[in-house]
Amino acid sequence: MKVLGISGHYHDSAAALVIHGVPVAAVQEERLSRHKNDAGFPLAAIEWCLDHAHLSPDDLDAVVFYEKPTLKFDRVLTGMLQGWPGSWRGYPKAMKNMLGEKLWVRGLIASQLGISARKVRCIEHHQSHAAAAFLTAPTQEAAIITADGVGEWATFTVGTGHKRADGSTDIRILRELRFPHSLGLFYSAVTSYLGFAVNEGEYKVMGLASYGRPIWIEAMRKLLRPTRDGAFALDLRYFDFLGKVESGYSERFVALFGPPRKNWQPIDLKGAEGQRFADIAASAQALLEDVMVGIAARLRNETGMSDLCLGGGVALNGVANARILREAGFNRLFVPSAPGDAGCALGAALYADRILFGQPHKPVPDHPYWGPEPDEAALLRIAQEDGIPAIVSGSAIEEVADALAASKVVGWVDGALEYGPRALGHRSILAAPHDVAMRDRLNRDIKYREEFRPFAPVVAAEHADLFFELPPGGARLARFMSGVVPVRPEWRDRLAGITHVDGTARVQVLDREMEPRLHALLEAYGQRTGVPVLLNTSFNLAGEPIVNTVAEAYSTFCRCGIDLLVAGNVCVTKPRVVRAQILENVA
Ligand SMILES: [Fe+2]
């Protein structure tokens, strides 16, 4: 069967193609449209997936959308009526939003692709999340937790999954929590209160939390209380998910925690106000972790299963993930490379293949590289046309290792684009991880972002335990950079560029078979410095999506302080005079 999965119309639109039970292509719309977090109908992503597999829409057996729009409309309308008259401000916008394309998505997909609407199916949002987590994981049976802001009604589910010897597959959702009681919306309200953009700034809250103390946690517990059935409930007096849709918190929230941060207000961590924001971030983070660990531990006892698969946007919280692995009793924790809504495109396609159509289970290749390949020859041509030195090197790995050891910053493009928000070695900016000067240089000259946000390391799997305190199962969690773990104290000075203020790092543990070239680069760098670890950050500037093509990589290279751009065996060096001009413009 040929099944196309689609996510879109909320945030992080994407498409994924499954043929005969195995993924062949998946890509986020933002990587092609170049609009960060593109939420539109993912036409470019669909076209690329079909082109990649040499298919036309007629060849598809089914197209599966990642949520049920009528159920979602039911939730939006019910919420508005329940919240009336307080919800009147958000009502026109919500109705216009839903009554446009979103509600009639089956017809929209059918007309955009020129196929019969009978081929278009919709599955529930949290089924898509659960499938993205469980069906891509190398496990035969697992407990499953999904947690996000909100789908149709569900915001949090617990369940189980089985892949049986006869080829059949099932995913059972045992219980679900419904809107407006949502761990994701709780965290997003805190994100908004701290002056960051919802659905994007949650990473910043996690980074800021490391600078704070959880001294507001008792106040936070007023907002989110455990319930007797093992779930939790929000005290809705502290939130406003209907009237003030953009912020999500109420006046009562402000009365409890003080004035919110304006988005333009700098965070001075040495001042009392900056420390208050960091303490509030730390308190919200600690409460989210407590809730996740508590629910995961109960699910472990209930199911007796040794593996847990985690999906939904909350699964991007690497600090919480590491605590779940350490404390909830599971042996292994699987988080896919795209646990958020983009990953639902692949989840929906796999769910339809295995469960709606009953096709036999097949192992899914255990890597995140499902997008477009770069064109190295195009980079050579573009750079030469621009008069910038470019060569085809027979020993690119050795030359890049030399450059990194000499404190050069490298733009690294290699192989198919990652699926999900993290650069996992195919569209990365790489640098030496040893000192804070490099971290500050990357923040100032390249990423143009807040100083409190940490950079992540990548380490060869066979050396990971030497540098990082990985719990049992931690290497697997770190395969897609999904866990934050302590840097071993004796290495923190030599890994200061990637060690966060609390001594931790969001490490990627790299298996040779998953990415042999980056693994070879880590080995070559280790031979030069004694430390086979590199700083690895996504290849983009602040506010832009991760680069896809070599032309986009070259454009980014030209606009920031990257010294060397490498795509496969093509190496482009920035002349010193050009670099000086760029840095002058930045300053
Ligand atoms: Fe979601």
Image: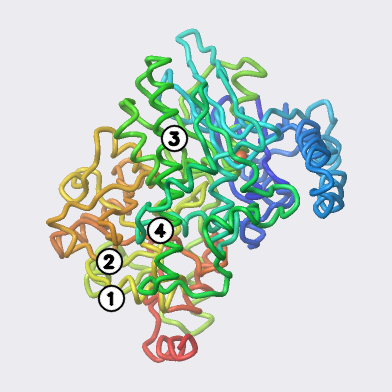
Horizontal side of residue 573 vs 525, given as left or right:
right
Residue at left offset 59%, top offset 58%: 254
- Quadrant placement of the C terminus: bottom left
Is residue 16 visible in the rendered image? The answer is no
Tell me the quadrant of ligand 1.
Answer: top right
Residue at left offset 56%, top offset 64%: 260
* Pointer 4 residue: 279
- Quadrant placement of the N terminus: top right
Mark 3 residue type: Met
Q: Earlier in the sequence, mark 4 or mark 2?
A: 4
* Pointer 2 residue: 497
The label on residue 473 is none
Q: Is residue 198 above or below residue 576?
A: above
Q: Earlier in the sequence, mark 1 or mark 4?
A: 4
Q: CA distance from mark 4 to mark 3?
A: 20 Å
Q: Earlier in the sequence, mark 4 or mark 3?
A: 4
**Secondary structure category for the residue under label 4:** helix
Q: Residue 268: percent from the left, percent from the top?
A: 41, 74
The answer to whether the residue bearing label 4 lies less than 8 angstroms from the nearest atom of ligand 1 is no
Q: Residue 422: percent from the left, percent from the top?
A: 46, 52
Please name which of the two marks, 1 or 4, marks the residue nearer to the observer.
4
Q: Quadrant of residue 525?
A: bottom left
Residue at left offset 25%, top offset 50%: 486
Mark 2 residue type: Gly
Q: CA distance from mark 2 to mark 1?
A: 7 Å
